[in-house]
């Protein structure tokens, strides 16, 4: 049961971390859609941050600051008013590119480690490869979910 201050929040906003990570919060809506025809009233409420009123105020402020309107000014005003949400996805995307770039090097090194004779490779190299594998694949999953949120 939610307190009165949080009654207006949607199901996604009040779900836990695990529920949001695996999209468990959407199961009730999927079951309802399987049983009946979905309508606007059966949809969950959206977050206030996603509402168009707040975005409209920000865009109007930037648009009114423009003195001379040119051909691509609407595009530039949109980018300027939404610069922080746009930039929030840049760092996870760069990290994802780095992890995906490192993946073939890791696979090449693991193949060399496995195919080498026992006396040439040490156990510590194997443990290092296990750690590197964990870092790369956990990094891929975290950075993938980081820019999609």
Image (cartoon, rainbow, N blue to C red):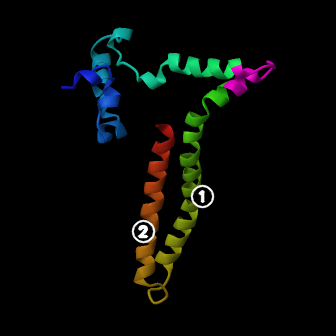
- Is 78 positioned to the left or the right of 109 in the image? right
Q: Is residue 19 above or below residue 64?
A: below
Q: Position of residue 47 (x, y in %)?
A: 41, 24
Q: Position of residue 31 (x, y in %)?
A: 27, 22
Which quadrant does the N terminus fall into? top left
Part of the protein shown in magenta: 65-77
* Residue tagged 1: 101
Which of the 4 image quarters holds residue 6?
top left
Report helix, strand or loop for mark 1.
helix
| Residue at horizontal 40 percent and vertical 21 percent from the top | 46
* Residue tagged 2: 131
Given the current orientation, which residue lies at the most extreme left position?
1
Report helix, strand or loop for mark 2.
helix
Which of the 4 image quarters holds residue 76?
top right
Along the line of sight, which residue is nearer the eye, 92 or 104? 92
Q: Position of residue 72 (x, y in %)?
A: 77, 23
Along the line of sight, which residue is nearer the eye, 72 or 66? 66
As drawn, the label of residue 1 is: none
- Is 119 positioned to the left or the right of 84 in the image? left
Along the line of sight, which residue is nearer the eye, 82 or 41? 82
Q: What is the distance, in whole Å, between disc 1 and disc 2 at their CAs? A: 17 Å
| Residue at horizontal 30 percent and vertical 30 percent from the top | 14
Choose the circle earlier in sequence order: 1 or 2: 1
Q: Position of residue 18 (x, y in %)?
A: 30, 41
Marks 1,2: beta carbons within 8 A = no
Crowd class of label 2 (few under 14; some 14 to 19; many from 20; radius 10 Å): few
Crowd class of label 1 (few under 14; some 14 to 19; many from 20; radius 10 Å): few
């Amino acid at each position: 049961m939610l307190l009165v201050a949080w009654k207006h929040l949607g199901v996604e906003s009040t779900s836990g971390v695990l529920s949001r990570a695996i999209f468990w919060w959407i199961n009730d809506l999927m079951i309802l859609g399987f049983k009946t025809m979905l309508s606007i009233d059966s949809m969950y409420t959206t977050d206030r941050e996603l509402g168009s009123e707040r975005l409209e105020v920000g865009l109007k402020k930037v648009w009114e600051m423009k003195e001379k309107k040119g051909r691509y000014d609407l595009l530039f005003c949109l980018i300027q008013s939404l610069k922080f949400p746009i930039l929030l996805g840049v760092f996870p995307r760069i990290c994802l590119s780095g992890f995906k770039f490192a993946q073939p090097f890791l696979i090449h090194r693991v193949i060399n480690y496995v195919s080498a004779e026992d006396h040439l490779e040490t156990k510590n190299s194997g443990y290092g490869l296990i750690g590197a594998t964990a870092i790369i694949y956990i990094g891929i999953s975290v950075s993938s979910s980081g820019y999609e949120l």
